[in-house]
Image (cartoon, helix red, strand yellow):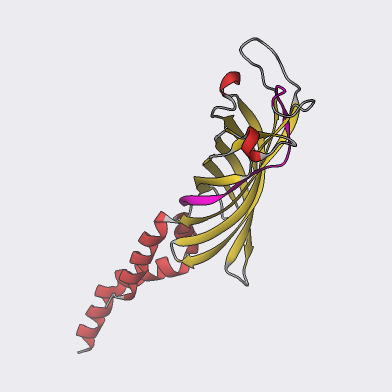
Amino acid sequence: MMGATGHGQVRYLPLAILASGVLLRPQPLLAQDRVEVGPLVGFFAPTTTFAGPLRMVPGSNNYTLNIAIAVGAEANFWLTPRVGLGALIGWSPSAVRQESATLADTSLSAPVQLFGMFLALKFNLSHLNGDVRARAGAGYLRHMGAAFAPYGHPGSVTGLVGIEATLPLRRALRLTGGLDAYLYSLQLTDTFGTRYEHRFQADLLARVGLMWVPGAHRVGALMTSVARMP
């Protein structure tokens, strides 16, 4: 009887070693959480004006982009538990209007394309099981539509700074919310070579989204299989 019991213990010893390795070494499991990807939705909110030709309002050449809904996607790759790299792509169906004019009189279609790459720093909120993330990097913002067609749909390399908070919904799903600022300069030049005033721009992207962690499913399946071992 003792021999049989001892033989059974020896037979299951490799399984016990595997289980203890999975449960007691968190770092390999953290590696499964390196990649995050998901959609976002929010608002594109310009805060500055740019210079253009005189149109509806005599004596004023100030233009502004309208606040509009924005959609896009974001992905992060965490190099360590606190430091990561990220990328964002977005689009907003904004419009341009001349400052001091009514929206109906001067609104012209001006969709915006957003791109960003950044370094992210993560700060854990242990009491909420969430985190706060600061980001800084570079972006690219392109002005499209009828409003910018005479100027060749100009694009600008931008600075990018932002902050984001996340909360877990499930093991592989997180709710996110954040605010990014795209900082750049804009000068319109038409087909005749006319250059308008060079101005600094600060465009905000307020957003919420969902982050899917693909590796978390594999971790959950592995833990389940270990728990079911005889």
Quadrant where the image shows the N terminus: bottom left
Residue 106 at x, y = what percent? 64, 33
Q: Position of residue 97 (x, y in %)?
A: 66, 34
Residue at 34% x, 65% y: name it: 222
Picture quarter containing residue 142? top right
Does the segment drawn in magenta span residue 116? no
| Residue plotted at (68% across, 39% down) | 102
Residue depicted at x 51% and y 46%:
71
- Above or below 23: residue 213: above
Say how many tags the image has: 0
Residue 15 found in image quarter: bottom left
In the drawing, does residue 25 fall left or right of residue 104? left
User: What's the magenta region?
Assistant: 35-55
Tell me the quarter of the image containing the C terminus.
bottom left
Q: Is residue 131 left or right of residue 224?
A: right
User: Can I make out residue 166 in this image?
Assistant: yes
Q: Nearer the viewer, residue 76 or 146?
A: 146
In percent of width and height, residue 192 lies at 64, 9
- Across and down, in percent, residue 14 comes to 30, 69
Task: Please tell me whether the stretch drawn in magenta is mainly helix, strand or loop.
Answer: strand
With 168 as the anchor, is 19 left or right in this view?
left
Q: Nearer the viewer, residue 47 or 35?
A: 47
Q: Indicate whether residue 45 is drawn in magenta.
A: yes
**Quick one: which residue is furthest to the bottom in this view?**
1
User: Residue pushed farthest right?
Assistant: 59
Q: Is residue 12 above or below residue 187?
A: below
Residue 197 versus residue 155: which sits nearer the camera? 197
Asked whether residue 138 is in view, the answer is: no
Viewer-side residue, 204 vs 127: 204
